[in-house]
Amino acid sequence: MTEILIAHRGEPVTWPENSLQGYREVLAAGARYIETDVQITADGVAVLSHDPSLHRLTGRDLAVTDTPADTVLSLPAGYPERFGDRYRDYRISTLAEFAALLADWPQARAFVEIKHASINAFGTDRVIGIMLETLADVSGQCILISFEYAALAHARDRTDLPLGWVLPHWDDEHRQLAENLAPDYLFVNHKRLPPLPAALWDGPWQWVVYTVNRAEEIPLYLERGFAMIETNEIRSLLGGQPGHE
């Protein structure tokens, strides 16, 4: 099971998403694959954040791309709406800290997502340059992923790292784009899948479905042709902890 499960943002049902503690815990529980999201601060520091705003994690409605790293990293980031004061000492992590953690787990692999807001603010070339420089020491453990097709096409010209495209739509146009890009991985939201008996697209990629949290659903996706499953409940699916509703 460790070879097919991806820990989505660590384990956000238990710890604030994209927190180093969450990644440490799921790696210690046996996770082989993890996923994280990267935004770029106003002064060019790569930090772990899914949203363009800091509001959910910190309660402060600040855009990451407009805010200096010192401010971003100083704010309590315990996702108070979900966890109250339980994680009030947590802070947003840098991609450099994530890379250092990944280096401690050489068998682990990380899917690192390039986000639209940062590309829109700083341009594709700068964002990818910052990410590649930050990940240089663990580049052999990393796969770049994104919804942004053009960003992945640009990354292909700059790096030999594996690539994963997160499909924004399921239609013939996007199938043709996938064939043109030929990424190593294709990610699709389970809600975007066409009903059976429609088949997955053939290609050189491995299929990844997200977000799947129930053990009884996994064989159904594997039978359909998916190679990997992204989940918020990886310890539960690995048998390490009880699940969450």
Image (cartoon, rainbow, N blue to C red):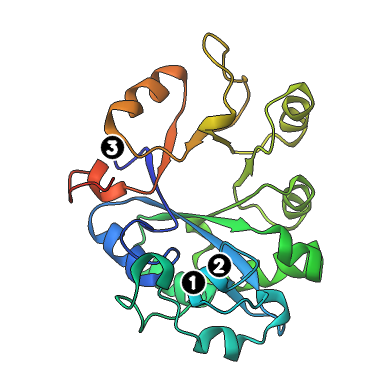
Which quarter of the rendered picture does the N terminus lie within? top left
* Marks 1/2: CA–CA distance: 9 Å
Look at the numbered disc 2 and give the secondary structure of its residue: loop
| Near-viewer residue (10 or 90) | 90
Nearer the observer: mark 3 or 1; the answer is 1
Q: Point out the tag, 3 or 2, that comes first from the N-terminus.
A: 3
* Marks 3/1: CA–CA distance: 30 Å
Q: Amino acid at mark 3?
A: Met
Where residue 124 appears, x then y in whole percent? 79, 62
Circles 3 and 2 in contact, beta carbons < 8 Å: no
Q: Quadrant of residue 222?
A: top left
84 horizontally vs 189: left or right: left
Q: Badge 1 local density, few (<14 within 10 Å), some, or many (20+)?
A: many
Q: Badge 2 local density, few (<14 within 10 Å), some, or many (20+)?
A: many
Where residue 56 appears, x then y in whole percent? 52, 68
Give the residue at mark 3: 1
Look at the numbered disc 1 and give the secondary structure of its residue: helix
Where residue 106 appears, x then y in whole percent? 36, 61
Give the residue at mark 2: 49
* Marks 3/2: CA–CA distance: 27 Å
